[in-house]
Image (cartoon, rainbow, N blue to C red):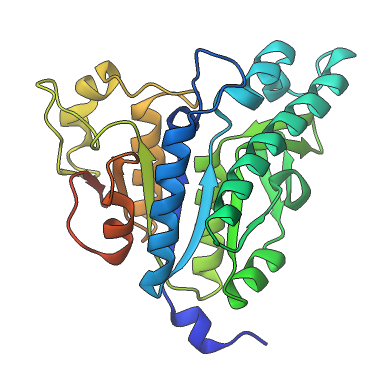
Amino acid sequence: MKSNLIEQKPIVFVKIGGSLITDKIKPFTLKEHALEVICEEIKTAMKSGKRLIVGHGAGSFAHVPAKKYQTHKGIINEESYRGMAEVADMAAQLNRIVIKKLLEMRVNAVSVSPLSTIIAENHIMKSFCTDSIEELLRLGLLPVLYGDQILDTKIGCTVYSTEKILGHLAIKLKMKGYLVERIIHCGQTNGVYDRDGNTIPLITGSTIELFRGALGASGGVDVTGGMIHKVEETLALAQQGIPGLIIDGIEHGSLSKAVMGDPVVGTRIEA
């Protein structure tokens, strides 16, 4: 039986962009300084009294074989089976690097494999077993998920972005009675920029159309579809009661301050 105390402790989701911790133009290349900074920030944020759930993108690791084998389309030929194995392996390899760095910093981080916990049906999530994640939270450990290859009962396989995985998890935990406070996206910019290069402080469902042109032209394009995709995914979550925040993951102190609720430079995404 779950402790009411643990359910009442706010949960903050932290998404680390794959292009923040890897060089997306150099396959299988880590940005070691960026990883060091973000892990230090997570360590500090863990002292806030809130529960954290971390997810990181695949960056220049799993996206290389995913593009080669087109595994997001399912099993399309005999090579797809090899592709499934290679994508899952590279996604897990980057995750182990992130976990190792957190452990070095005395953060009790535990890997959670989306491949092992999520089943899709024709790209749509069919089931997500969250029992182990909930138990990790109860024990005060840090669950770390990642963008991954997912099994699909209709087409064989697909690829789920970190945003998609964390979004589904946040809604599921909220429906179970957990206090999900918000999701924080750590990228390479101080939030979302307008056409003049200034940070947009707030985007809502009623104002997103005002900024859509700037979003499409922003320099924040990543492997999951760019800044517009990130904003739309976060807004969809905000409309279900879980607001978001987009910040610079490298700027020292931003993430830990944001988790603690202190003001930081960034873009708030609210319903």
Image point (21%, 43%), residue name: 266
- Looking at the image, is 256 positioned above or below residue 30? below
Q: Which of 219 and 202 is in front in this view?
A: 219
Q: In this view, does 111 lie to the left or right of 209?
A: right
Where residue 131 appears, as percent x and y from the top left, is 70, 68
Q: Which of 10 and 25 is in front in this view?
A: 25
Quarter of the picture containing the N terminus is bottom right
Residue found farthest to the right: 78
Q: Is residue 17 shown to the viewer in this render?
A: no
Q: In this view, does 80 lie to the left or right of 226?
A: right
Where residue 25 appears, as percent x and y from the top left, is 50, 12
Which image quadrant for residue 3?
bottom right
Where residue 41 appears, as percent x and y from the top left, is 38, 53
Where residue 132 appears, as percent x and y from the top left, is 71, 66
Q: In this view, does 63 lie to the left or right of 262?
A: right
Number of numbered discs: 0
- Looking at the image, is 180 positioned above or below residue 5? above
Residue found farthest to the front: 104
Q: Is residue 268 shown to the viewer in this render?
A: yes
- Looking at the image, is 17 positioned above or below residue 215? below
Which image quadrant for residue 149?
top right
Image point (34%, 28%), residue name: 228
Image point (25%, 44%), residue name: 205
Q: Which of 69 and 266 is in front in this view?
A: 266
